Amino acid sequence: MEMYDNLGIVGEGSYGTVMKCKHKETGSIVAIKKFIDKDEDRNLKKIAMREIKFLKQFRHDNLVNLLEVFRQKRRLFLVFEFIDHTILEELERYPRGLEGKRLRKHLFQIIRATEYLHSNNVRTGHYKQGCYKIIHRDIKPENILVSESGIVKLCDFGFARTLEVTREPFTEYVATRWYRAPELLVGDKKYSKPVDIWALGCLAMEMTTGIAFLTGNSDLDQLHKIVIKVGPLTLHQQELYFQNPEFAVARLPEVYHPSSARKKYPKLNPLLSELVHSCLQIDPIDRTSCTQMLNHRYFTKDQFAEK
């Protein structure tokens, strides 16, 4: 840290802090993530090393750039390009949601970043050498950066995972609850890219209205909100639900839902309602893909995607 002046803390989490810093020689402004000193915390170390591994291999206009990694007094420091603010801060500035043009530009770039992860081959470094696709697992407003010029970048890859051929079960606890797909909430460990698609649907709703769509105060409450606002769980999800002793005591709500996207999400632009509806499908098999989203009329009309 001797080469940098600390200009202040811009973010904090269980992993440590993010500081806005200035390089003493070049004058360049960067963001430095400082991990807390917990050598005994294996999960924290795993998160840090996972983020470093992925970001060293990623290069995309809509992913944050990792510039440098160093250790000082046993602490790990990650140096990133500094981006002005987050989607969360934009939503605080625009509490009724983002204006239509800004919304479309931001969503397009977020989906483009996620498509890159879902389709990109990343080489793993363990004994089972190979190239695998990536799921982010923690898409939410505070993990999306926006520059002054309107460039949007996805960040925070501490929970990202490779989709390996072996398809070993993944960990259960990922993603902030409000953006968590139903398969994650019921404890299905064989999840895949559709968990990111669900999060994108929740994010699109929030960016449009200014209000988080599904705001459960527990996993049980979150599942009930999903059933009430989106639709009933699949049979497989219901089986997992009733296997959980914490859930089994609470009967699932029974609610009628219109099949039409425009009737289900009447406050949204008609084309955007279709896009959101394609993301917020209870069965992960039925969810759209990032590539399909980018080719949706919401983005292709008036040659928007070509601009």
Image: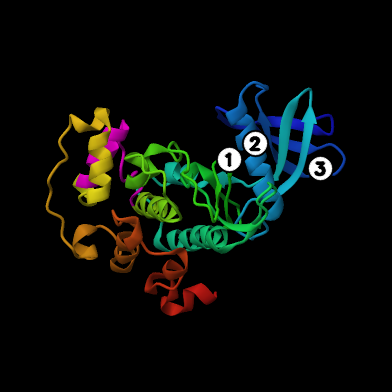
Determine whether 240 is above or below 163 in the image. Answer: above
Asked whether residue 127 is drawn in magenta, I would say no
Q: Is residue 82 left or right of residue 102?
A: right
For the record, the magenta segment spans 209-227
Q: Position of residue 209 (x, y in %)?
A: 33, 51
Q: Which residue is mark 3?
A: 27
Q: Earlier in the sequence, mark 1 or mark 3?
A: 3
Asked which secondary structure carries label 3, the reply is loop
**Residue 162 appearing in the image:** yes
As rendered, which of 257 and 211 lies closer to the eye?
A: 257
Mark 1, secondary structure of its residue: loop
Classify mark 2: helix, strand or loop: helix
Tell me which amino acid carries mark 1: Gly
Identify the residue position indicated by label 1 in the image: 158
Colour pattern: rainbow
In front of the other: 153 or 242: 242
